[in-house]
Amino acid sequence: MSQNVFTKSISTLIFGLSLTACGGGGASGGAAVVTSALSGTAAVGFAVVNGTVNIKCANSIAIAPSNTSAAGAIQVNLAGQTLPCALQVTGGTINGVANTNNYHAIATSAGNVNVTPLTDLLVANLAGTATPTTWFAGLTTAQLAAITAGQVTTAATNVKTALGLTTQLAGIDLITTAFTPTRNNVMDNTLEALQAAITNNATPYTTLLTNAGASANAGFTTPAGFNAALTAAYVPPGGATTPTVTGFSPATGAVGTVVTITGTNLGLGFQPAPIVKFGTTAVTTPLTFNGQTSISFAVPTGLAAGAHTITIGGMTGVPLTVGTFTVTAAPVAPAAPGGATATAVSATQIDLAWSTVATATSYNVYRSTAANVVITAGNKINASPVTTLTYSDSVGLTAATPYFYKVTAVNVGGESVGSAEVTATTSAVVPPAVTGLTLSPAFDGLTNFANSVPSGTLGSFTYNQGVLQYVTVNYLASPITLAEQVQISVYAGGVNTAYLAGVGAPACVITPVVGVSWPACSTVGITFDKVAGTVTFVNTPMNIGVAGTLFTLNGSLTFPPF
Protein backbone atom coordinates (compact mmCIF):
# COMPACT_ATOMS: atom_id res chain seq x y z
CA MET A 1 0.00 0.00 0.00
CA SER A 2 1.13 3.56 -0.58
CA GLN A 3 2.29 5.95 2.12
CA ASN A 4 -0.84 8.13 2.28
CA VAL A 5 -1.65 11.11 4.47
CA PHE A 6 -3.01 10.06 7.86
CA THR A 7 -6.75 9.55 8.05
CA LYS A 8 -8.75 11.45 10.67
CA SER A 9 -8.00 8.51 13.00
CA ILE A 10 -4.19 8.29 12.98
CA SER A 11 -2.68 4.87 12.60
CA THR A 12 -0.11 4.68 15.43
CA LEU A 13 1.39 1.22 15.37
CA ILE A 14 3.16 -0.11 18.44
CA PHE A 15 5.00 -3.36 18.68
CA GLY A 16 6.18 -4.68 22.02
CA LEU A 17 8.44 -7.48 20.94
CA SER A 18 10.21 -9.91 23.25
CA LEU A 19 13.25 -11.41 21.51
CA THR A 20 15.70 -13.79 23.17
CA ALA A 21 19.04 -14.29 21.44
CA CYS A 22 21.24 -17.36 21.67
CA GLY A 23 23.88 -19.17 19.65
CA GLY A 24 26.44 -17.65 17.32
CA GLY A 25 27.16 -17.22 13.66
CA GLY A 26 24.65 -15.53 11.38
CA ALA A 27 25.06 -12.52 9.13
CA SER A 28 28.24 -10.52 8.75
CA GLY A 29 29.19 -8.28 11.68
CA GLY A 30 28.29 -10.95 14.25
CA ALA A 31 24.48 -10.62 13.97
CA ALA A 32 22.63 -12.88 16.43
CA VAL A 33 20.51 -15.89 15.42
CA VAL A 34 17.13 -15.70 17.18
CA THR A 35 15.45 -18.90 18.39
CA SER A 36 12.38 -17.53 20.25
CA ALA A 37 9.08 -15.96 19.23
CA LEU A 38 8.36 -12.28 18.71
CA SER A 39 5.30 -10.82 20.40
CA GLY A 40 3.93 -7.36 20.89
CA THR A 41 1.20 -4.89 20.04
CA ALA A 42 0.29 -2.84 17.00
CA ALA A 43 -1.54 0.40 17.74
CA VAL A 44 -1.65 4.18 17.24
CA GLY A 45 -3.42 5.20 20.37
CA PHE A 46 -6.10 2.80 19.08
CA ALA A 47 -5.23 -0.84 18.43
CA VAL A 48 -4.57 -1.93 14.85
CA VAL A 49 -7.05 -4.76 14.37
CA ASN A 50 -6.34 -7.51 11.84
CA GLY A 51 -3.33 -5.67 10.42
CA THR A 52 -0.90 -7.68 8.29
CA VAL A 53 2.57 -8.08 9.84
CA ASN A 54 5.47 -8.64 7.44
CA ILE A 55 9.06 -9.19 8.63
CA LYS A 56 12.40 -9.41 6.80
CA CYS A 57 15.59 -10.42 8.61
CA ALA A 58 19.28 -10.56 7.71
CA ASN A 59 19.12 -14.03 6.18
CA SER A 60 17.07 -15.63 3.43
CA ILE A 61 14.66 -17.61 5.59
CA ALA A 62 11.14 -16.39 4.76
CA ILE A 63 8.67 -15.54 7.51
CA ALA A 64 4.99 -16.04 6.73
CA PRO A 65 2.79 -12.94 7.24
CA SER A 66 0.62 -12.89 10.33
CA ASN A 67 -2.25 -10.72 11.56
CA THR A 68 -2.83 -8.65 14.65
CA SER A 69 -5.62 -9.69 16.99
CA ALA A 70 -8.73 -7.73 17.95
CA ALA A 71 -6.60 -6.13 20.69
CA GLY A 72 -3.73 -5.38 18.32
CA ALA A 73 -1.58 -8.26 19.61
CA ILE A 74 0.92 -10.05 17.35
CA GLN A 75 2.70 -13.40 17.62
CA VAL A 76 5.52 -14.36 15.24
CA ASN A 77 7.98 -17.27 15.48
CA LEU A 78 11.53 -16.07 14.68
CA ALA A 79 13.31 -19.39 15.09
CA GLY A 80 16.50 -19.43 13.06
CA GLN A 81 16.25 -15.79 11.97
CA THR A 82 19.18 -13.34 12.06
CA LEU A 83 19.01 -9.73 13.30
CA PRO A 84 18.65 -6.94 12.25
CA CYS A 85 15.00 -7.36 11.15
CA ALA A 86 12.75 -4.87 9.39
CA LEU A 87 9.03 -4.82 10.25
CA GLN A 88 6.04 -3.56 8.29
CA VAL A 89 2.37 -3.43 9.31
CA THR A 90 -0.31 -2.77 6.69
CA GLY A 91 -4.09 -2.71 6.44
CA GLY A 92 -6.47 -3.62 9.21
CA THR A 93 -8.73 -1.18 11.00
CA ILE A 94 -8.14 1.47 13.65
CA ASN A 95 -11.15 2.36 15.80
CA GLY A 96 -13.38 0.89 13.09
CA VAL A 97 -11.79 2.91 10.28
CA ALA A 98 -9.70 1.28 7.56
CA ASN A 99 -5.97 1.85 7.99
CA THR A 100 -4.56 3.21 4.72
CA ASN A 101 -0.94 3.68 5.81
CA ASN A 102 2.04 1.36 6.09
CA TYR A 103 4.41 1.72 9.03
CA HIS A 104 7.91 0.36 9.59
CA ALA A 105 10.57 -0.25 12.23
CA ILE A 106 14.05 -1.78 12.60
CA ALA A 107 15.05 -4.25 15.34
CA THR A 108 18.82 -4.48 15.88
CA SER A 109 18.65 -6.42 19.12
CA ALA A 110 16.35 -8.82 20.93
CA GLY A 111 13.60 -7.29 23.02
CA ASN A 112 10.74 -4.87 22.53
CA VAL A 113 10.14 -3.28 19.10
CA ASN A 114 7.62 -0.47 18.54
CA VAL A 115 6.14 0.20 15.09
CA THR A 116 4.59 3.68 15.02
CA PRO A 117 4.57 6.78 12.82
CA LEU A 118 7.63 7.85 14.84
CA THR A 119 9.53 4.67 13.96
CA ASP A 120 8.33 5.04 10.37
CA LEU A 121 9.95 8.49 10.26
CA LEU A 122 13.03 6.92 11.84
CA VAL A 123 13.22 4.35 9.01
CA ALA A 124 12.76 7.11 6.39
CA ASN A 125 15.66 9.03 7.92
CA LEU A 126 17.84 5.92 8.34
CA ALA A 127 17.35 4.86 4.71
CA GLY A 128 17.21 8.34 3.18
CA THR A 129 13.86 7.65 1.53
CA ALA A 130 10.50 9.41 1.43
CA THR A 131 8.77 6.07 0.74
CA PRO A 132 9.68 3.42 3.34
CA THR A 133 7.18 1.05 1.69
CA THR A 134 9.25 1.03 -1.50
CA TRP A 135 12.43 0.64 0.54
CA PHE A 136 10.95 -2.36 2.39
CA ALA A 137 9.79 -4.04 -0.82
CA GLY A 138 13.31 -3.93 -2.28
CA LEU A 139 15.19 -4.66 0.94
CA THR A 140 17.92 -7.32 0.69
CA THR A 141 19.56 -9.41 3.37
CA ALA A 142 22.88 -7.67 2.66
CA GLN A 143 21.31 -4.25 3.21
CA LEU A 144 19.76 -5.43 6.47
CA ALA A 145 23.02 -6.95 7.70
CA ALA A 146 24.77 -3.61 7.10
CA ILE A 147 22.43 -1.68 9.44
CA THR A 148 24.01 -0.91 12.83
CA ALA A 149 22.51 0.00 16.17
CA GLY A 150 24.44 3.27 16.04
CA GLN A 151 22.75 4.24 12.77
CA VAL A 152 19.34 3.51 14.27
CA THR A 153 20.15 5.58 17.37
CA THR A 154 21.25 8.53 15.20
CA ALA A 155 18.04 8.38 13.15
CA ALA A 156 15.95 8.25 16.35
CA THR A 157 17.76 11.33 17.68
CA ASN A 158 17.16 13.14 14.38
CA VAL A 159 13.41 12.43 14.58
CA LYS A 160 13.12 13.59 18.20
CA THR A 161 15.10 16.75 17.48
CA ALA A 162 13.18 17.64 14.32
CA LEU A 163 9.81 17.26 16.08
CA GLY A 164 10.92 19.08 19.22
CA LEU A 165 10.41 15.95 21.35
CA THR A 166 13.88 15.68 22.92
CA THR A 167 12.63 16.76 26.36
CA GLN A 168 9.15 15.22 26.14
CA LEU A 169 10.55 11.80 25.20
CA ALA A 170 13.70 12.00 27.34
CA GLY A 171 14.68 8.48 28.41
CA ILE A 172 12.22 6.92 25.96
CA ASP A 173 13.59 4.90 23.03
CA LEU A 174 11.27 5.16 20.02
CA ILE A 175 11.81 1.46 19.25
CA THR A 176 12.63 -0.39 22.44
CA THR A 177 10.58 1.36 25.17
CA ALA A 178 7.37 -0.63 25.69
CA PHE A 179 4.01 1.11 26.15
CA THR A 180 0.29 0.38 25.85
CA PRO A 181 -2.00 1.89 23.21
CA THR A 182 -4.20 3.67 25.75
CA ARG A 183 -4.24 7.31 26.84
CA ASN A 184 -2.27 8.54 29.83
CA ASN A 185 1.21 7.35 28.96
CA VAL A 186 3.80 9.64 27.36
CA MET A 187 4.30 7.69 24.13
CA ASP A 188 0.62 7.15 23.37
CA ASN A 189 -0.26 10.77 24.21
CA THR A 190 2.60 11.90 21.96
CA LEU A 191 1.24 9.82 19.07
CA GLU A 192 -2.25 11.29 19.59
CA ALA A 193 -0.74 14.80 19.55
CA LEU A 194 1.16 13.94 16.34
CA GLN A 195 -2.10 13.13 14.54
CA ALA A 196 -3.75 16.28 15.91
CA ALA A 197 -0.83 18.40 14.66
CA ILE A 198 -1.03 16.80 11.21
CA THR A 199 -4.72 17.69 11.01
CA ASN A 200 -4.62 21.10 12.66
CA ASN A 201 -1.55 22.34 10.76
CA ALA A 202 -2.77 20.82 7.46
CA THR A 203 0.54 18.96 7.09
CA PRO A 204 0.31 15.72 5.07
CA TYR A 205 2.10 12.79 6.66
CA THR A 206 3.87 12.26 3.34
CA THR A 207 5.47 15.69 3.78
CA LEU A 208 6.97 14.61 7.10
CA LEU A 209 8.32 11.45 5.43
CA THR A 210 9.80 13.51 2.59
CA ASN A 211 11.57 15.84 5.02
CA ALA A 212 12.82 13.00 7.19
CA GLY A 213 14.11 11.02 4.20
CA ALA A 214 15.80 13.92 2.40
CA SER A 215 19.27 12.72 3.45
CA ALA A 216 20.21 9.44 5.11
CA ASN A 217 20.92 9.73 8.84
CA ALA A 218 20.94 13.56 8.62
CA GLY A 219 19.04 16.16 10.62
CA PHE A 220 15.88 17.62 9.08
CA THR A 221 13.17 20.19 9.75
CA THR A 222 9.38 20.11 9.82
CA PRO A 223 6.99 22.46 7.97
CA ALA A 224 6.31 25.90 9.44
CA GLY A 225 4.02 25.82 12.46
CA PHE A 226 4.04 22.03 12.80
CA ASN A 227 6.03 21.74 16.00
CA ALA A 228 3.97 24.48 17.65
CA ALA A 229 0.82 22.55 16.74
CA LEU A 230 2.37 19.36 18.12
CA THR A 231 3.22 21.06 21.42
CA ALA A 232 -0.26 22.59 21.69
CA ALA A 233 -1.93 19.22 21.14
CA TYR A 234 0.09 17.26 23.69
CA VAL A 235 -1.61 16.34 26.96
CA PRO A 236 0.69 15.14 29.75
CA PRO A 237 -0.47 11.90 31.40
CA GLY A 238 -3.22 12.73 33.87
CA GLY A 239 -3.86 16.19 32.38
CA ALA A 240 -7.41 17.56 32.16
CA THR A 241 -8.91 17.35 28.67
CA THR A 242 -12.67 17.82 29.14
CA PRO A 243 -13.79 20.37 26.52
CA THR A 244 -16.29 23.19 26.99
CA VAL A 245 -17.89 25.62 24.54
CA THR A 246 -18.63 29.16 25.74
CA GLY A 247 -19.74 30.79 22.49
CA PHE A 248 -19.14 31.43 18.80
CA SER A 249 -19.24 34.31 16.33
CA PRO A 250 -20.44 35.51 13.94
CA ALA A 251 -23.86 33.86 13.83
CA THR A 252 -24.60 34.74 10.18
CA GLY A 253 -22.64 35.02 6.98
CA ALA A 254 -22.08 33.68 3.50
CA VAL A 255 -20.21 30.53 2.54
CA GLY A 256 -16.51 31.13 3.27
CA THR A 257 -17.16 33.34 6.31
CA VAL A 258 -14.64 32.65 9.11
CA VAL A 259 -16.36 31.48 12.32
CA THR A 260 -14.64 31.24 15.72
CA ILE A 261 -15.67 28.91 18.55
CA THR A 262 -14.49 29.84 22.06
CA GLY A 263 -14.15 27.57 25.10
CA THR A 264 -11.60 25.35 26.85
CA ASN A 265 -9.63 22.27 25.75
CA LEU A 266 -11.02 22.67 22.24
CA GLY A 267 -8.08 20.83 20.71
CA LEU A 268 -7.19 18.35 23.43
CA GLY A 269 -10.75 17.38 24.29
CA PHE A 270 -11.63 15.93 20.89
CA GLN A 271 -9.46 13.01 19.86
CA PRO A 272 -7.69 12.35 17.70
CA ALA A 273 -8.62 15.82 16.37
CA PRO A 274 -11.69 18.11 16.47
CA ILE A 275 -14.37 17.58 13.85
CA VAL A 276 -16.61 20.61 13.23
CA LYS A 277 -19.88 20.16 11.36
CA PHE A 278 -22.67 22.37 10.04
CA GLY A 279 -25.53 19.91 10.35
CA THR A 280 -24.12 16.83 8.59
CA THR A 281 -21.54 18.76 6.53
CA ALA A 282 -18.03 18.59 8.00
CA VAL A 283 -15.52 21.42 7.78
CA THR A 284 -12.72 20.07 5.57
CA THR A 285 -10.52 23.18 5.42
CA PRO A 286 -7.77 23.54 8.07
CA LEU A 287 -8.78 24.59 11.58
CA THR A 288 -6.91 27.52 13.13
CA PHE A 289 -6.20 27.25 16.86
CA ASN A 290 -5.50 29.96 19.43
CA GLY A 291 -4.10 27.71 22.10
CA GLN A 292 -6.95 25.63 23.51
CA THR A 293 -9.42 28.49 23.91
CA SER A 294 -10.62 29.10 20.35
CA ILE A 295 -10.90 27.42 16.97
CA SER A 296 -11.53 29.31 13.71
CA PHE A 297 -12.68 27.84 10.39
CA ALA A 298 -14.48 28.77 7.19
CA VAL A 299 -18.14 28.00 6.50
CA PRO A 300 -18.01 25.04 4.07
CA THR A 301 -18.71 25.58 0.39
CA GLY A 302 -21.94 24.14 -0.93
CA LEU A 303 -24.05 24.89 2.17
CA ALA A 304 -27.56 26.03 1.28
CA ALA A 305 -28.80 29.35 2.59
CA GLY A 306 -30.61 29.01 5.92
CA ALA A 307 -30.03 27.81 9.49
CA HIS A 308 -27.45 25.11 10.30
CA THR A 309 -26.52 23.65 13.71
CA ILE A 310 -22.80 23.78 14.44
CA THR A 311 -21.34 20.86 16.43
CA ILE A 312 -17.80 19.97 17.51
CA GLY A 313 -16.66 16.50 18.46
CA GLY A 314 -14.03 13.81 18.05
CA MET A 315 -13.87 10.42 16.38
CA THR A 316 -15.97 8.93 19.17
CA GLY A 317 -18.44 10.17 21.76
CA VAL A 318 -21.30 12.66 21.54
CA PRO A 319 -20.33 15.99 19.93
CA LEU A 320 -21.06 19.29 21.66
CA THR A 321 -23.68 21.61 20.17
CA VAL A 322 -22.17 25.04 19.52
CA GLY A 323 -25.19 26.94 18.22
CA THR A 324 -27.14 27.87 15.08
CA PHE A 325 -25.43 29.61 12.17
CA THR A 326 -27.48 31.19 9.41
CA VAL A 327 -25.92 30.98 5.96
CA THR A 328 -26.85 34.00 3.87
CA ALA A 329 -27.16 33.91 0.10
CA ALA A 330 -23.86 34.32 -1.71
CA PRO A 331 -23.32 37.61 -3.54
CA VAL A 332 -24.22 37.49 -7.22
CA ALA A 333 -22.10 39.03 -9.94
CA PRO A 334 -23.79 41.96 -11.70
CA ALA A 335 -25.32 41.94 -15.17
CA ALA A 336 -23.30 43.16 -18.12
CA PRO A 337 -23.52 46.90 -18.83
CA GLY A 338 -25.87 47.99 -21.58
CA GLY A 339 -25.84 50.96 -23.91
CA ALA A 340 -22.08 50.85 -24.56
CA THR A 341 -20.75 53.33 -27.14
CA ALA A 342 -17.30 54.14 -28.53
CA THR A 343 -16.48 57.50 -30.17
CA ALA A 344 -13.20 58.45 -31.84
CA VAL A 345 -12.08 61.85 -30.57
CA SER A 346 -8.75 62.16 -32.36
CA ALA A 347 -5.98 60.16 -33.93
CA THR A 348 -4.93 59.02 -30.44
CA GLN A 349 -8.11 58.95 -28.31
CA ILE A 350 -11.41 57.06 -28.20
CA ASP A 351 -14.08 57.83 -25.59
CA LEU A 352 -16.39 55.13 -24.22
CA ALA A 353 -19.66 55.36 -22.32
CA TRP A 354 -22.24 52.88 -21.01
CA SER A 355 -25.37 52.65 -18.89
CA THR A 356 -25.32 52.14 -15.12
CA VAL A 357 -25.70 48.67 -13.59
CA ALA A 358 -27.63 48.90 -10.32
CA THR A 359 -25.57 46.30 -8.38
CA ALA A 360 -22.15 47.26 -9.75
CA THR A 361 -19.49 48.97 -7.66
CA SER A 362 -17.03 49.48 -10.53
CA TYR A 363 -16.39 48.68 -14.19
CA ASN A 364 -13.55 47.29 -16.34
CA VAL A 365 -12.79 48.12 -19.98
CA TYR A 366 -11.28 45.60 -22.41
CA ARG A 367 -9.77 46.44 -25.83
CA SER A 368 -8.49 44.57 -28.86
CA THR A 369 -7.45 45.41 -32.40
CA ALA A 370 -9.55 42.46 -33.60
CA ALA A 371 -13.26 41.75 -33.27
CA ASN A 372 -14.62 39.45 -30.53
CA VAL A 373 -12.73 40.93 -27.57
CA VAL A 374 -11.79 38.27 -25.02
CA ILE A 375 -12.26 39.19 -21.36
CA THR A 376 -8.73 38.49 -20.11
CA ALA A 377 -6.22 40.39 -17.98
CA GLY A 378 -4.09 41.05 -21.05
CA ASN A 379 -6.92 42.97 -22.75
CA LYS A 380 -7.95 45.07 -19.73
CA ILE A 381 -6.86 48.70 -20.24
CA ASN A 382 -7.94 50.41 -17.01
CA ALA A 383 -5.22 50.25 -14.36
CA SER A 384 -7.69 50.83 -11.50
CA PRO A 385 -11.44 50.19 -11.17
CA VAL A 386 -13.59 52.63 -13.15
CA THR A 387 -16.27 54.14 -10.92
CA THR A 388 -17.91 56.41 -13.52
CA LEU A 389 -19.89 55.58 -16.65
CA THR A 390 -17.25 56.88 -19.08
CA TYR A 391 -13.66 56.10 -19.97
CA SER A 392 -11.19 57.83 -22.28
CA ASP A 393 -8.75 55.47 -23.98
CA SER A 394 -5.67 57.44 -24.99
CA VAL A 395 -2.75 55.08 -24.39
CA GLY A 396 -1.11 53.22 -27.24
CA LEU A 397 -3.60 54.13 -29.96
CA THR A 398 -2.50 54.55 -33.58
CA ALA A 399 -4.06 56.90 -36.12
CA ALA A 400 -6.61 55.53 -38.61
CA THR A 401 -6.91 52.21 -36.75
CA PRO A 402 -10.10 50.37 -35.69
CA TYR A 403 -10.35 49.30 -32.04
CA PHE A 404 -12.90 46.98 -30.42
CA TYR A 405 -14.19 47.24 -26.83
CA LYS A 406 -16.26 45.44 -24.21
CA VAL A 407 -17.17 46.71 -20.72
CA THR A 408 -17.83 44.57 -17.63
CA ALA A 409 -19.50 45.38 -14.30
CA VAL A 410 -17.94 44.33 -10.97
CA ASN A 411 -19.13 43.85 -7.38
CA VAL A 412 -18.25 41.64 -4.40
CA GLY A 413 -19.96 38.73 -6.15
CA GLY A 414 -17.60 38.86 -9.10
CA GLU A 415 -17.35 40.28 -12.61
CA SER A 416 -20.05 40.21 -15.26
CA VAL A 417 -19.68 38.95 -18.79
CA GLY A 418 -18.69 41.51 -21.36
CA SER A 419 -21.10 44.06 -22.77
CA ALA A 420 -22.11 44.09 -26.38
CA GLU A 421 -18.97 44.81 -28.39
CA VAL A 422 -18.49 48.34 -29.72
CA THR A 423 -15.89 49.68 -32.11
CA ALA A 424 -14.44 53.00 -33.26
CA THR A 425 -11.64 54.00 -35.63
CA THR A 426 -9.14 56.65 -34.66
CA SER A 427 -9.00 59.59 -37.07
CA ALA A 428 -6.18 60.07 -39.53
CA VAL A 429 -3.46 62.58 -38.70
CA VAL A 430 -4.21 65.98 -40.24
CA PRO A 431 -1.08 68.12 -40.65
CA PRO A 432 -1.45 71.58 -39.13
CA ALA A 433 -1.72 74.67 -41.29
CA VAL A 434 1.52 75.76 -42.89
CA THR A 435 2.97 78.60 -40.91
CA GLY A 436 6.74 78.61 -41.45
CA LEU A 437 9.23 80.37 -39.14
CA THR A 438 9.88 83.91 -37.97
CA LEU A 439 13.42 84.99 -36.90
CA SER A 440 13.62 87.89 -34.48
CA PRO A 441 15.81 89.84 -34.99
CA ALA A 442 16.93 88.89 -38.48
CA PHE A 443 19.83 86.47 -38.87
CA ASP A 444 22.18 87.37 -41.77
CA GLY A 445 19.26 89.27 -43.24
CA LEU A 446 16.75 86.37 -42.86
CA THR A 447 13.50 87.21 -41.04
CA ASN A 448 11.03 84.63 -42.43
CA PHE A 449 11.43 81.04 -43.51
CA ALA A 450 8.59 79.33 -45.35
CA ASN A 451 7.35 75.84 -44.50
CA SER A 452 7.88 73.31 -47.30
CA VAL A 453 8.06 69.58 -47.98
CA PRO A 454 11.38 68.53 -46.44
CA SER A 455 13.91 66.13 -47.81
CA GLY A 456 15.04 63.19 -45.66
CA THR A 457 13.13 60.54 -43.66
CA LEU A 458 12.91 58.90 -40.22
CA GLY A 459 13.43 62.03 -38.22
CA SER A 460 16.16 63.76 -40.25
CA PHE A 461 14.59 66.56 -42.31
CA THR A 462 16.02 69.48 -44.31
CA TYR A 463 13.89 72.45 -45.44
CA ASN A 464 15.28 74.57 -48.29
CA GLN A 465 14.41 78.18 -49.15
CA GLY A 466 16.14 79.28 -52.27
CA VAL A 467 19.67 78.10 -52.95
CA LEU A 468 21.60 79.18 -49.87
CA GLN A 469 19.04 79.18 -47.07
CA TYR A 470 18.00 76.02 -45.20
CA VAL A 471 16.77 74.70 -41.83
CA THR A 472 17.53 71.19 -40.52
CA VAL A 473 15.56 69.31 -37.88
CA ASN A 474 16.98 66.02 -36.55
CA TYR A 475 15.23 63.59 -34.19
CA LEU A 476 17.25 60.78 -32.55
CA ALA A 477 16.32 58.19 -29.92
CA SER A 478 19.63 57.25 -28.31
CA PRO A 479 20.01 53.49 -27.70
CA ILE A 480 22.50 54.22 -24.92
CA THR A 481 20.85 56.96 -22.81
CA LEU A 482 17.31 56.23 -24.10
CA ALA A 483 16.89 60.00 -24.49
CA GLU A 484 14.77 61.33 -27.36
CA GLN A 485 16.73 64.35 -28.60
CA VAL A 486 15.94 67.11 -31.13
CA GLN A 487 18.54 69.22 -32.97
CA ILE A 488 17.77 72.41 -34.93
CA SER A 489 20.09 74.46 -37.15
CA VAL A 490 19.53 77.53 -39.38
CA TYR A 491 21.75 78.71 -42.27
CA ALA A 492 20.85 82.02 -43.91
CA GLY A 493 23.58 82.12 -46.56
CA GLY A 494 26.19 83.93 -44.49
CA VAL A 495 29.37 82.79 -42.78
CA ASN A 496 27.82 81.08 -39.71
CA THR A 497 25.21 78.43 -38.94
CA ALA A 498 22.99 79.01 -35.89
CA TYR A 499 22.17 76.29 -33.37
CA LEU A 500 20.05 75.93 -30.27
CA ALA A 501 21.40 78.21 -27.54
CA GLY A 502 21.58 77.38 -23.84
CA VAL A 503 23.49 75.20 -21.37
CA GLY A 504 24.36 71.84 -22.87
CA ALA A 505 23.02 72.77 -26.33
CA PRO A 506 22.95 72.27 -29.39
CA ALA A 507 20.23 69.66 -28.70
CA CYS A 508 17.26 69.33 -26.37
CA VAL A 509 15.59 66.21 -24.96
CA ILE A 510 11.85 65.59 -25.17
CA THR A 511 11.87 63.90 -21.75
CA PRO A 512 14.74 64.63 -19.34
CA VAL A 513 17.05 61.66 -18.65
CA VAL A 514 19.44 61.35 -15.72
CA GLY A 515 23.00 61.83 -16.92
CA VAL A 516 22.05 63.82 -20.03
CA SER A 517 22.86 67.54 -19.65
CA TRP A 518 20.90 68.88 -22.61
CA PRO A 519 17.92 71.05 -21.69
CA ALA A 520 14.36 69.79 -21.88
CA CYS A 521 12.74 70.78 -25.19
CA SER A 522 9.82 72.29 -23.29
CA THR A 523 12.18 74.76 -21.56
CA VAL A 524 13.41 76.14 -24.89
CA GLY A 525 9.99 76.34 -26.51
CA ILE A 526 10.24 73.26 -28.77
CA THR A 527 7.39 70.76 -29.21
CA PHE A 528 8.18 67.78 -31.43
CA ASP A 529 5.28 65.45 -32.33
CA LYS A 530 6.40 62.63 -34.60
CA VAL A 531 2.88 61.14 -34.73
CA ALA A 532 1.24 64.41 -35.77
CA GLY A 533 4.21 65.36 -37.97
CA THR A 534 4.86 68.80 -36.49
CA VAL A 535 7.65 70.70 -34.75
CA THR A 536 6.75 74.06 -33.21
CA PHE A 537 8.91 76.84 -31.81
CA VAL A 538 7.95 79.46 -29.23
CA ASN A 539 10.69 82.00 -28.52
CA THR A 540 13.30 79.31 -29.06
CA PRO A 541 16.79 80.81 -28.41
CA MET A 542 19.39 80.43 -31.21
CA ASN A 543 23.09 81.38 -31.41
CA ILE A 544 26.27 80.59 -33.34
CA GLY A 545 28.08 78.80 -30.53
CA VAL A 546 28.64 81.63 -28.09
CA ALA A 547 26.85 82.63 -24.91
CA GLY A 548 23.55 84.47 -25.08
CA THR A 549 20.73 84.58 -27.60
CA LEU A 550 21.38 85.89 -31.11
CA PHE A 551 17.77 85.54 -32.28
CA THR A 552 14.59 83.57 -31.47
CA LEU A 553 12.45 81.23 -33.57
CA ASN A 554 8.64 81.21 -33.63
CA GLY A 555 6.30 79.17 -35.78
CA SER A 556 6.14 75.56 -36.99
CA LEU A 557 7.26 73.15 -39.67
CA THR A 558 5.62 69.93 -40.86
CA PHE A 559 7.03 66.57 -41.92
CA PRO A 560 5.75 63.07 -42.73
CA PRO A 561 4.62 61.39 -39.47
CA PHE A 562 6.68 58.40 -38.34
Image (spheres, grey):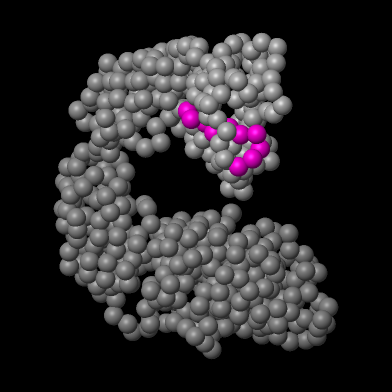
Question: Residue lying farthest front?
Answer: 445
Nearer to me, 173 or 331: 331
Is 259 rendered above or below residue 269? above
Whether residue 536 is visible: no
Question: x%, y% of residue 485?
Answer: 61, 34
Locate residue 380, reporting x and y percent: 43, 29
Q: Is residue 542 magenta?
A: yes
Q: Is residue 354 left or right of residue 458?
A: left
Across and down, in percent, residue 373 comes to: 45, 20
Q: Residue at x 29, y 80 (%)?
A: 240
Total labels: the figure holds: 0
Residue 324 located left or right of residue 118: left
Q: Residue at x 78, y 86 (%)?
A: 23
Along the line of sight, the residue nearer the viewer: 453 or 127: 453
Residue 78 in the image: above or below residue 449: below
Q: Residue at x 67, y 58 (%)?
A: 134
Looking at the rendering, in which quadrant would you find the N terminus? bottom right
Q: Is residue 439 above or below residue 20?
A: above
Residue 187: image location, x then y, percent? 47, 79
| Nearer the observer, 504 or 83 | 504
Quarter of the image with the C terminus is top right
| Vertical arrangement, residue 394 with respect to residue 267, above or below | above
Highlighted magenta segment, given as a residue range: 538-547
Q: Which quarter of the picture shows residue 212?
A: bottom right
Q: Tell me if residue 64 is in the magenta stretch.
A: no
| Residue 219 seen in the current view | yes
| Principal secondary structure, stretch drawn in magenta | strand
Residue 58 in the figure: left or right of residue 462 = right
- The outermost residue toward the bottom is 171
